[in-house]
Image (cartoon, rainbow, N blue to C red):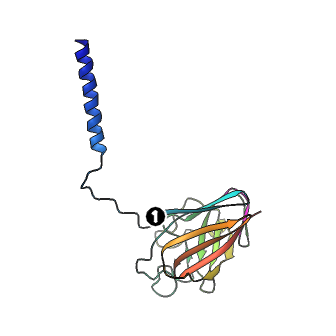
Amino acid sequence: MKINRALIGVLTLAAAAGFAFAQDAPKKDAPKKAPPASPAMETSATLGGKSIAIKYSAPSVKGRKIFGGTGALQPDNTVWRAGANNATALHTEGDITVGNLNVPAGDYTLYVFLDPKGWQLAVSKQTGQWGINRDGSTTLDDSKAIGRTPMKMSKPAGLVETYKMTLAGKGKKGTLTLEWENVAASVTIATK
């Protein structure tokens, strides 16, 4: 009798586990989730033995005019969150310089002033904020900004459909490059 009860108990547990597994298994005809419109991305480098990482969201052109002029997604003389969704996040393990700015070890956000005469990268002590307000204005609080530094402007070889940031370098010096549509902008980064 005890063996029968034990066998029934084991069979009941096995059946319940099989049912739970079947419920979690993907359906053959279930629609696949679309990838996010602006996927989360990261670029990082180790300079002078210190890790530097930037997290951002990467939107795509999708036939739109992105920078400059009337009707652009990011018009001239505005502040851009250097990506989509949350403000672009910078983390550095050590004290660094970004262009002409001294940036202590810690967490920051990055914004770009889209001056048609030359972009400027802003480094802010703010963290965790969405990149823009509901009315479309910037979330950059100038009172919390470390400052702005000029960026070197250039043109990529061809259309850059999906926005990308690249942090690369050797030794103590590196370069942060932003590329999207027909624009590239870069700034030097170095450890102290």
Q: For residue 18, what is the image quadrant?
A: top left
- Give SS at disc 1: loop
Q: Is the magenta stretch mostly helix, strand or loop?
A: strand
> x and y percent of residue 46 in the render?
67, 60
Residue under pointer 1: 39
Is residue 140 visible in the rendered structure shown here?
Answer: no
134 left or right of 93 in image: left
Q: Which of the image's four quarters has the N terminus?
A: top left
Seen from this angle, which residue lies furthest top? 1
Disc 1 crowd rating (10 Å Cα; few below 14, some 14-19, many 20+) is some
Query: Which amino acid is tagged 1?
Result: Pro
Image height of 153 relative to 53, above or below: below
Q: Is residue 157 positioned above or below 12 on the image?
A: below
> Which residue is drawn at the image coordinates 52% and 67% (left, top)?
131
* Residue farthest to the right, as pictured: 192
Magenta-drawn segment? 91-98
137 in the magenta segment: no
- Residue at 56% x, 65% y is 88
In the rendered image, is residue 170 in sight?
A: yes
Q: How many labels were placed on the picture?
A: 1
Q: In this view, does 7 lie to the left or right of 91?
A: left
Q: Where residue 104 appears, x then y in whole percent? A: 72, 60
Quarter containing the C terminus: bottom right
Residue 86 place in picture, x, y as percent: 51, 63
Front residue (pair 122, 28): 28
Who is closer to the viewer here, 123 or 99?
Answer: 99
Rendered residue at 57%/69% (across/down):
165
For residue 152, what is the image quadrant?
A: bottom right
Q: Where is residue 174 in the image (x, y as percent from the top left)?
A: 69, 68
Q: In this view, does 178 lie to the left or right of 3?
A: right
